[in-house]
């Protein structure tokens, strides 16, 4: 909980000081036709990285977007039955995926602003993955009928050592819409590093934990977490053209 509070405070201070800096720059520099659009947009995200996610997007300079956001995902799987496509017996699978993250992303627009190159970092105060597998039906072995409970189950979990993860991706669409509303599509990946894996077996399968090291070595090369999300954005305001500002000051028009 302390990590979550610290990340929330850090993000809030970042937004506060960024707004002060932008506001100060607007006062210090006279309006010119070269000033960037100072619009701000609120985004709602849904996809593989969030059951629900929100962000705020700023444009500090032409073709550059800064986004500060929060994502949360809590997904549960219960009594899912499968034979994995090749087993003679069916398995019953339970799973839990739960994580939340704060992220700061910088986006550079290219190809006439139709495509965005995105880079940044995410902080994951919650990063939880757990699963459990057992046979769905009883199994006869050596003329003895074993129930799923007697045979035992295999459970496992894995986590990542660092709560900080760099991000790289591509964005299609506009983080700050040209009109009041807009959609964008984002694809990328977090670099998570080597995972720590724990395997727990019960009853006849209680020695399966000896395979932890072999499993860690087997998936050690898969250190990227792919992300796919859709974003609905709402533009809060738009800076008036410099000519309108001048005319308003002079009392013209």
Image (cartoon, helix red, strand yellow):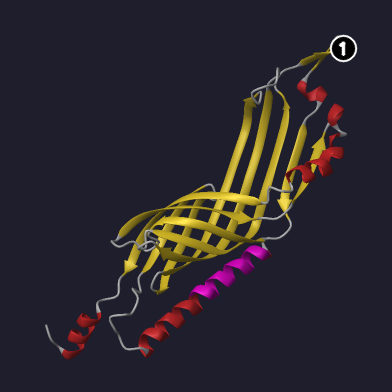
Instruction: Residue at 78%, 24% (x, y): give it.
Output: 149
Q: How many marks?
A: 1
Instruction: Residue at 53%, 74% (x, y): give it.
Output: 14
Q: Which element carries disc 1, helix, strand or loop?
A: loop
Kindly give the residue lying farthest to the top in the view shown.
143
The image position of residue 124, as x and y in percent, is 63, 59
- Horizontally, residue 215 falls left or right of residue 18, namely right
Q: Nearer the viewer, residue 126 or 226?
A: 226
Identify the magenta region: 3-15
Where the N terminus falls, by quadrant?
Answer: bottom right
- Horizontally, residue 82 falls left or right of residue 253, namely right
Q: Quick check: is 175 in the magenta stretch? A: no
Where the C terminus falls, by quadrant?
Answer: bottom left
Instruction: Residue at 55%, 70% (x, y): give it.
Output: 11
Q: Nearer the viewer, residue 22 or 37?
A: 37
Q: Which quarter of the figure has residue 77?
A: top right
Please say if 217 is above or below 64.
above
Badge 1: few (under 14), some or many (20 or more) residues near its Cα, within 10 Å?
few
Q: Quick check: is 11 in the magenta stretch? A: yes
Please say if 175 is above or below 215.
below
Instruction: Residue at 33%, 73% (x, y): give it.
Output: 37
Q: Nearer the viewer, residue 158 or 217?
A: 217
Look at the magenta stretch and give its main secondary structure. Answer: helix
| Residue with the mark numbered 1 | 142
């Amino acid at each position: 909980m302390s990590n979550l509070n610290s990340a929330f405070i850090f993000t809030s201070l970042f937004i506060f000081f960024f707004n002060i800096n932008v506001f100060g720059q607007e006062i210090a520099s006279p309006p010119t036709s070269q000033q960037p659009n100072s619009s701000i947009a609120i985004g709602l995200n849904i996809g593989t990285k969030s059951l629900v996610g929100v962000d705020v997007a700023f444009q500090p300079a032409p073709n550059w977007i800064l986004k500060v956001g929060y994502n949360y995902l809590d997904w549960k799987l219960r009594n899912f039955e499968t034979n994995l496509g090749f087993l003679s017996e069916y398995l019953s699978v339970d799973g839990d995926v739960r994580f939340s993250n704060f992220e700061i992303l910088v986006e550079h627009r290219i190809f006439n602003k139709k495509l965005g190159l995105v880079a940044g970092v995410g902080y994951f105060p919650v990063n939880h993955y757990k699963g459990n597998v057992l046979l769905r039906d009883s199994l006869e072995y050596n003329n003895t009928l074993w129930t799923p409970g007697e045979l035992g189950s295999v459970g496992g979990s894995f986590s990542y050592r660092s709560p900080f993860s760099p991000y790289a991706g591509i964005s299609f669409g506009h983080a700050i819409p040209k009109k009041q509303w807009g959609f964008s599509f984002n694809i990328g990946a977090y670099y998570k590093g080597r995972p720590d894996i724990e395997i727990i077996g019960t009853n006849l399968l209680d020695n399966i934990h000896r395979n932890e090291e072999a499993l860690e070595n087997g998936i050690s090369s898969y250190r990227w977490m792919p992300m796919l999300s859709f974003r609905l954005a709402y533009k809060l305001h738009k800076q008036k053209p410099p000519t309108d500002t001048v005319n308003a000051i002079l009392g013209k028009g």
